[in-house]
Structures are given as C-alpha cells and as structure tokens.
Amino acid sequence: MKKHLLVSLLVLLVGAGLLLVGCESLNGPDPAALDASLEESFDVTATENQESILKTSGVNIDSANGFFSLRWSEVSQRFKGTTFVVGHASAVVFEKPATPRDRNAAGLDMGDVSLAIGADKFDLRKLMLRLSGVRYGVGGGSRHGQGGPNGERPEIVNIPFVGGGSYQLAATGSDKVAAFNLTIKAPTKLVAITGLTDKQEIDATQDLKITWDGDAAATDMAVVLAPLVKRGRFGGSQRLEPIFQSVNAAAGSYTITAAALQELISKSGAKAFSLHLSQGVHSEVTDAKLGKIILSAGGDDRVMLTVK
C-alpha cells in the first residue's frame, strides 16, 4: 500500500537566547499559556535539537556526509485535550562532510526517496531550497510542518512504529548520487517517562529523580530540560537554552540535582520546564562515493513540570 504524503520538514529553532521586544516572565501556571509556552520550549523534531541529541549521545556527526532520521514523538491536540504518537522521517546528503543544519552546505539530489516498513511505503517529499539545496522529509503532527507551494497545511501522517522492525530507505539516484538501499532497525520499544506526571509541581530544593521504561539496549539516550518560553505582551518570545545530558538507557533512572535545578532557575527565571527523554539507536554506513552516512531511529517522551 503506497501512501503519497505531504511534507513535514524539520525546521530550525531560533538560536538560544534570541530576545524579541516585550518579553516578560510568565507568573503562575495558567494552564492554556503553560501548554502553549512549553510546547514551544523544545521541539524535538527541530534539526538543531536532533543534532544536539546525537552529539550528547556521543555520535560524531561532524565527519558525516549523510543523515537519515526516524523519530516518533508525542503530539498534543491542545483544543481536544488529547495526545498521540506520530513518526517523522528526514534525509539529506552532502558532497563533503557537514551537519544537517549547516547553511553553507547544499543537500544533493537523490532522486526519489522512500521509506518502507512491511507492506507500507512512504514517499519522502523532495524540497529544493535556494540556500540549503535539496532536503527530503515526511511526517506528521509537528506544528512546524511546512506547507506546500500554495501554502496548504500538511496532513497528519503516522509512520507506524514497529518495535525492532527493519525500516528500508531507498533512493532512485541522480547524476549526483548513485541509487542505494539502506536499513535501520527501530528500538524494541519507545521510551516512556514513569514516576512523574504531566504538569506536576516539583520542589526545586530537592533532587529530581527521573525514571523510565524503554529499550535497555538503546545506544543513544539523552535527558533534556528546557525552560519555559517567555512570552511577550506583543507576541515576542525568548527561547532559553535547554540542558542536554547523556544517560545510560539500561540504568532506568537519572537524578538531576537540586543544585543544577536551582542554577537553571536562577539563569532563566523560569518557573516551569519541559522535561524530555530521547532514546534510540544509530548506525553508520560508509559509501564508496558519499562517505559516512549516519542512520538513526528513536522515540521521545515529555512531561511538563512547574516549580513551587
């Protein structure tokens, strides 16, 4: 069954610390404002954050010529009060080693690119960008999904998660890139935060223990603590730099010290945080012409926390 999909291309976050006119702290957990601000505080599908998670997990991305990523993350339907998990996929290759968000590196045309799992096949839409060359992407649910040429919004598409499943990535090739077929195995299960509930109030004078259920054999895992986005009265906002910390997937828990929490609160002035766990696997393939290609697959879970 072939599904022709609209693109949901990963979008770069504004650099940490960018301040727009009229920013102010959000005092007190107003539910609607809290939801909106924390959803913006850390977008796991953003290219910048994907890079940071890989680097935090010890992956050397600076020497790679190609990146293929599969992510499953929770998406909120704020007005319906529901959440669900959707899959995202992206692909880019370069003539020389570069990072996915390197604005000076142009992505190469790979022809038609598709992703298959079992009987399901997904076409990754090719987007030709003036400054960054050719990029490929597909997925659903991200509010950052980019519309089509006439500005239409992308539909929500779920690339299904199959624990331990083999996902086949294929490209027909072009005069720049030879045709290829690559495989990445998904983790056996998606990570889920345990012991903390969404919008839970925490005491910043006490250590914060994070526990999870997931794939103990996952090779890449990071904890991300992102301060609340400060909203301005004129629509501006200030995105504050998250904390990234590598953790051992097999440990099942990690503790953020009270001192670290208080330091982050002192620097950011934030009274609420978005706590993310990212867990997955990656592999490296060397192509005779393209060089090193990094393939990654994983999932994410998140809870929102307020501070007493």
Image (cartoon, rainbow, N blue to C red):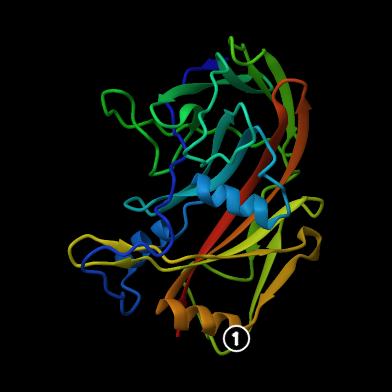
Query: Is residue 71 toward the left or the right of residue 3 in the image?
Result: right
Question: Which x, y percent locates residue 83?
Answer: 46, 50
Quarter of the image where one finds residue 175: top right
Question: Which x, y percent locates residue 54?
Answer: 66, 50
Looking at the image, which is closer to me, 303 or 268?
A: 268
Image vertical order of residue 27 relative to residue 35, above or below: below
Counting every numbered tag in the picture gives 1
Image quarter hosting the N terminus: top right
Question: Which x, y percent locates residue 285?
Answer: 77, 31
The residue lying at 31 percent from left, 72 percent from top is 30
The residue lying at 37 percent from left, 31 percent from top is 154
Image quarter hosting the C terminus: bottom left
Mark 1 surroundings: few (<14), some (14-19) or many (≥20) residues within 10 A: few
Q: Amino acid at mark 1?
A: Ala
Which residue lies most toward the bottom here?
A: 205
User: Taking the image as drawn, is residue 271 in sight?
Assistant: no
| Label 1 element class | helix
User: Taking the image as drawn, is residue 44 in sight?
Assistant: yes
Query: Is residue 266 toward the left or the right of residue 119 in the image?
Result: left
The residue lying at 37 percent from left, 34 percent from top is 146
Provide the residue designation for mark 1.
259
Query: Is residue 165 toward the left or the right of residue 234 in the image?
Result: right
